[in-house]
Image (spheres, helix red, strand yellow):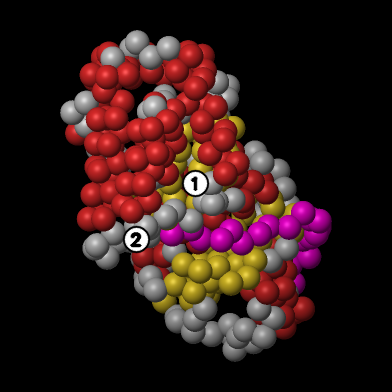
Amino acid sequence: MVYLSLGSNIGDRQLFLQLAIGLIIYRIGEVKRVSSIVETPAWGFEGDAFYNACLSLETALSPQKVLEELIIIEKILGRKRKTTKEYQARNIDLDILLFGEKIIHSHNLSIPHPRMEKRNFVLAPLAEIAPETLHPILNKSLEQLYLETEDTAQINSIKDNLFIPKRKKFIAIEGNIGAGKTTFTHQLHSAVGGTLLLENFYDNPYLADFYHDPEAHALKVETAFLEQRVVQLSYFFKDKIKSPIIADFSLEKSLLFAQQNLSEADFTDYKKEYIIASTKLPQPDLVLFLAQSIPQLQENIQKRGRDFEQGISDHYLQKIETGYAQWQKNSCLNIFELNTKEMDFVHDKDAFYSLLATFFCA
């Protein structure tokens, strides 16, 4: 069992603690318990009060690898470490307190964490979740250390609780044309790790013809997309893959677009082929739907500059939007909508943090 401390005294302190827990689950291991939040004065420097918490987790990673991952998580959440050894304000601070019964003293890692027995902001939440656990050097329980500590710093309990997100193994990102599916897929993958699965839409030989003459090429383009997605999913899931798998498409979008683009007769035949092809293929345990306005979709389409997309009309985008709305009502998949309207999640870190927090809630 590994015990970590989490602290924040900049920005939305509770949000940063919650984001850190979510990222720890995906990047390091299974979180077992999370303490209450305590608010304590800044320790070792003048600054705003900290929100602090502790958690326990199980991991297959080595102590050094856990340390490396914690530093990566801090960077993802915007912490900029200074080269000086002085204490400083930070939006997130993550430390290894205990790693089973290991005792480690290396150039960049000390376990148990030095001076943890002298710090109320560590002992209070740690004793809450593991009162009987022994300090491997002092041979005293954490509860005993908390009762005996000479640290008199005031501790305030915070009523709001942190939660342990459920880890998803297969996540698909969906949305209208130009919603930013692939961009967000890359961002989410960079944050939580795992494996990317990106659609090979450029391999569809009928796509450009479809946008030029939809009626003449609709069946060809939708059939080709279905075949490509089936082949891609079939080969991708044959190998042992590091989870989570994060894809910028779901197989069900084939059915959605086909229903909007094909005649009733063609769609009836197409649906039969879809059912046969999709029966044994894996389905995502979570679909994140990026909700976006039509004007923003058009702006994004123009920005990415694909020649064959430049003539897409507002009417067509609205038709697809209507299809997605109906799909969300009728699909058996676990679909969670992310409101990305008037939000620049690419350049605005706070906007991305907001989406990431919503993802952890899904």
Residue at coordinates 41% horizontally, 76% vertically from top-left?
104
Give the structural element (helix, strand or loop) at label 2: loop
Task: Determine whether, in the image, residue 154 is placed left or right of residue 296.
Answer: right
User: Which residue sits furthest bottom?
Assistant: 139
In-front residue for pair 318/27: 318
Residue span colored magenta: 150-169
Q: Is residue 179 visible?
A: no
The residue pinned by badge 1 equals: 287
Q: Residue 240: give x, y in percent of width and height.
A: 27, 65
- Considering only order in the chain, which callout, 1 or 2, is on the residue closer to the N terminus? 2
Q: Is residue 26 above or below residue 137?
A: above
Tell me where residue 131 sits by quadrant.
bottom right
Residue at coordinates 70% horizontally, 43% vertically from top-left?
48
Q: Is residue 160 magenta?
A: yes
Q: Is residue 266 magenta?
A: no
Q: Is residue 333 above or below residue 326?
A: below
Tell me where residue 267 sits by quadrant.
top left
Q: Is residue 341 above or below residue 349?
A: above
Q: Residues within 10 Å of mark 2 (few under 14, many from 20)?
A: few
For marks 2 and 1, give the CA distance: 19 Å
In-front residue for pair 335/160: 335
* Amino acid type, label 1: Val
Q: Residue 141: give x, y in percent of width and height.
A: 66, 85
Residue at coordinates 38% horizontally, 28% vertically from top-left?
262
Give the structural element (helix, strand or loop) at label 1: strand
* Amino acid type, label 2: Lys
Task: Determine whether, in the image, residue 15 is placed left or right of residue 174.
Answer: right
